[in-house]
Amino acid sequence: MKKKKQRTLRQKLNTERSAGILCTLPFTIGFLAFMIVPMCISLYYSFCDYNILTPPVFSGLKNFKRMIEDSVFYQTLFVTFKFAIISVPLRLVFALIVAMLLFKSTKMTGIYRAMYYLPSIIGGSVAVAILWKRLFSLDGLINKILMSLGMKESVAWLGDTRTAIWTLIILAVWQFGSSMLIFLSALKQIPTSLYEAARVDGANGWQQFWKITLKLLTPTIHFNLVMQMINGFLAFTQCLIITQGKPLNSTLFYTVYMYQQSFLFGSTGYGAALAWVMLALIAFITWILFATKKLWVYDGGL
Amino acid sequence: MMKNRKKIVNVVYHIFVCAAGFIMIYPLLWMIMSSFKETSTIFTTATSLIPEHFTLENYANGWKGFAKVSFATFFKNSLFISIVATVGTVLSSSIVAYGFARCNFPGKKILFAAMLASMMLPAQVLMIPQYLWYQKLNWVGSYLPLIVPYWFAVQGFFVYLMTNFIEGIPRELDEAAKIDGCSYYGIYRRIIFPLMVPSMITGSIFSFMWRWDDFLGALLYVNKTEKYPVSLALKMFCDPSSSSDYGAMFAMATLSILPAVLIFFCLQKYLVEGISTSGLKG
């Protein structure tokens, strides 16, 4: 009797349905326990006065009102937008140029590809962040090189509100390697017959690039743009280590401000509210990028 | 004449690509070479790449670490966290990917959409929510927040990568096994798992490198010096209170990127494939 019951349970488990549910169970649990539940808790806290040490007290829209009046909040939004809007397109342009250069395959291509890709592998690490800080310091490599080229005195790159953000932008652009690899594999999928047909019709190299290469790459560019924009808005480590938002908050990224409010200034409730606004902003930007997709992305197939 | 011109264009091409590539990796070369210079000469001789006096003193000094905790401990901690989290990520993601790729079940579409959404939902947005939650669970101060979630396939990227891979495995193999009496779980264990090893290697590489570089998680959850991973220990070189021994700093920074660089050069094929097929960041 018992044996029979066991078998039926076994048979029940061995259907496509239950196998699917069971196999995906780890993700279902993980998604609920480590994403949805924390998000819900923080949604509640964003409407509370809360500083980790004392229990939360419901305060309605106070945190959001504070945000509207908080000039630093606007400053961090501006800095973050500026960083993403300059660094992401620059990164894509470099990635595309280098991908076109490396498309022609020679004996050296493997080595070249490694050289251009290496910075992306380690660019997010703390090691590179502290290196960058020393490169742009007063007695750092950049100043030394510029002085040997004839500049009169060293520049405080990290201490000037006009230049500090650019050190972070350069660091971000330097890591164009992964976009480059994606472009390289997309370039390989463009059939050579298209170029041959264009040449027969008398198109020059420049026209071929605009009308064929770039047009067929637009889906890849769009995908890259979405992913990099999201990442651009979330840069954290580099800012925290290299500039800490200095000077005068001119490099204070949104995420770093969020971190400071929650963990250093004891306004965890406000930090939770900032996190939710960030999420809404990212969703909005992603939506815009997808909504404008049909205006410039080629989807006619080959 | 024509042949000569082609040759010249070729030479110019190689010189140009080589020079630009050299500029790309110059900062790294500079850091590595500086770590072999005497600390006092690093910035006075910044423009020359080759050290005048080759020394390993910086490595000895840096290895001593901070507050009597040596870098051996930091490296051990980093290795432990990265390996345990990576094993969890790869195993759990492969099972979940099998479920998505091979089985139809109610709610699959919603779950798959949730997985894609989790790819777009990055750690920085979840930083504060998760911290508050882990604090409730009494996990703050331990490695649990840096390890446990990864055993539940929370990184959609890996599930996505492996789902695509499994879909490329011919279904006829499944059918044949089913006729021979293999259960759905047996198909995973005996057929899919052995065949998806390449995608698991790709996944392990990415996961290991991301866990190794993880700074945010360690910054939030690890609060004892002897428990620090390398990324957090390196940051101490930047703290205003620490003496500025730049030689030691560059030496330890060089060591900290060594695993990633080694993996990159040994397993480049898997990395490149992973990026070009999934189209995600590295």
Image: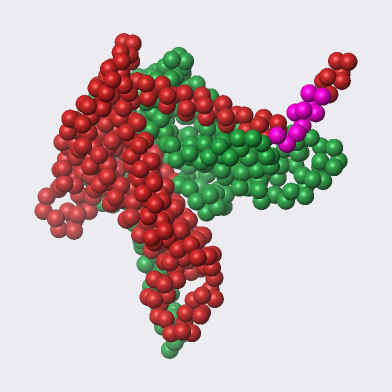
Chain colours: A red, B green
The furthest residue to the bottom: B1
Q: Is residue A204 above or below residue A169?
A: below
Question: Secondary structure of the magenta portion, mostly?
Answer: helix
Residue closest to the eye, A102 or B129: B129
Q: Is residue B204 above or below residue A146?
A: above
Q: Residue at x 25, y 39 (%)?
A: A77
B92 on left or right of A70: right
The furthest residue to the right: A1
Q: Which residues are magenta?
A: A8-17
Residue closest to the eye, A298 or B75: A298
Q: Report the quarter where the N terminus of chain B lies.
A: bottom left
Q: Point out residue B197 in the picture as x, y percentages from the top left corner.
A: 66, 43
Q: Point out residue B156 in the picture as x, y percentages from the top left corner.
A: 52, 38
Q: Residue at x 60, y 35 (%)?
A: B107
A51 on left or right of B166: left
**Residue B181 found in image quarter:** top right
Q: Point out residue B222 in the picture as x, y percentages from the top left corner.
A: 41, 21
Residue closest to the eye, B204 or B183: B183
Question: Does residue A9 show up magenta in the picture?
Answer: yes
Residue closest to the eye, B125 or A11: A11
Q: Point out residue A69 in the picture as x, y percentages from the top left corner.
A: 17, 30
Question: Does residue B44 show up magenta in the picture?
Answer: no
B35 on left or right of B75: left
Taking the image as drawn, is residue A87 in sight?
A: yes
